[in-house]
Image: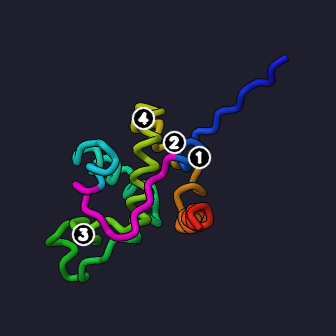
């Protein structure tokens, strides 16, 4: 008698995450993840809209420039290692779920996965494995 198999997208996504040791451009991330820059921009937009810690990693424009630039955040800067990690998670989610709305629902249902705390824990695990 065989046991039923359990599939966890969260575990699959975490296992395939990409960690960077420095800020990266969207082009560099696209190259590393073997995807296109427009795909990285789409994933970054999903993360910006649905993951508060991702959004908070962007530097803020001076308040007097918000209307001129139509945004509080400077999204033209390099992505932080945390943001790069989030984009890599979302790429894997998109590969499995195929639709933006399904990925957005996954983010809402698994908010714990998309935090600085989870990023730090996963990075510590990686460091322990490579030590």
The residue that label 1 is drawn on is 109
Instruction: Tell me if label 1 and label 3 are in contact, CB under 8 Å.
Output: no
Crowd rating for badge 2 (residues with CA inside 10 Å; few <14, some 14–19, many 20+): few
N-terminal label among 4 and 1: 4
Looking at the picture, does residue 62 appear above or below residue 93?
Answer: below
Looking at the picture, does residue 35 appear above or below residue 6?
Answer: below
Residue 35 on the magenta span: no
The residue that label 4 is drawn on is 95
Viewer-proximal residue, 16 or 104? 16
Which quadrant, please, contains the C terminus?
bottom right
Q: Which mark is residue 77?
A: 3
Viewer-proximal residue, 104 or 77? 77
Instruction: Tell me if label 1 and label 2 are in contact, CB under 8 Å.
Output: yes
Task: Judge depth for marks 3 and 2 and give the one in front.
Answer: 3
Viewer-proximal residue, 76 or 15? 15
Instruction: Pinpoint residue 125: horizontal percent, then vertical percent.
Output: 61, 62
Instruction: State the residue at coordinates (29%, 70%).
Output: 73
Q: Which residues are magenta?
A: 16-28
N-terminal label among 4 and 3: 3
The residue that label 2 is drawn on is 105
Instruction: Describe the element under mark 1 as helix, strand or loop.
Output: helix
Crowd rating for badge 3 (residues with CA inside 10 Å; few <14, some 14–19, many 20+): few
The residues tagged by marks 4 and 1 sit, at their Cα atoms, a distance apart of 18 Å
Instruction: Describe the element under mark 3 as helix, strand or loop.
Output: loop
Instruction: Tell me if label 3 and label 2 are in contact, CB under 8 Å.
Output: no
């Amino acid at each position: 008698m065989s046991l039923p198999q359990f599939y966890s997208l969260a575990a699959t996504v975490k296992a395939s995450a990409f960690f960077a040791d420095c800020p990266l451009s969207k082009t560099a991330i696209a190259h590393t993840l073997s995807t296109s820059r427009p795909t990285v921009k789409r994933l970054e937009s999903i993360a910006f809209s649905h993951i508060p810690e991702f959004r908070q990693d962007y530097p803020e424009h001076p308040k007097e420039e918000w209307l001129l630039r139509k945004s509080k955040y400077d999204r033209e800067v390099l992505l932080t290692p945390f943001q790069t990690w989030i984009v890599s998670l979302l790429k894997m989610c998109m590969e499995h779920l195929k639709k933006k709305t399904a990925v957005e629902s996954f983010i809402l249902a698994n908010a714990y996965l998309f935090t600085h705390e989870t990023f730090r824990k996963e990075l510590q695990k990686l460091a322990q494995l490579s030590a």
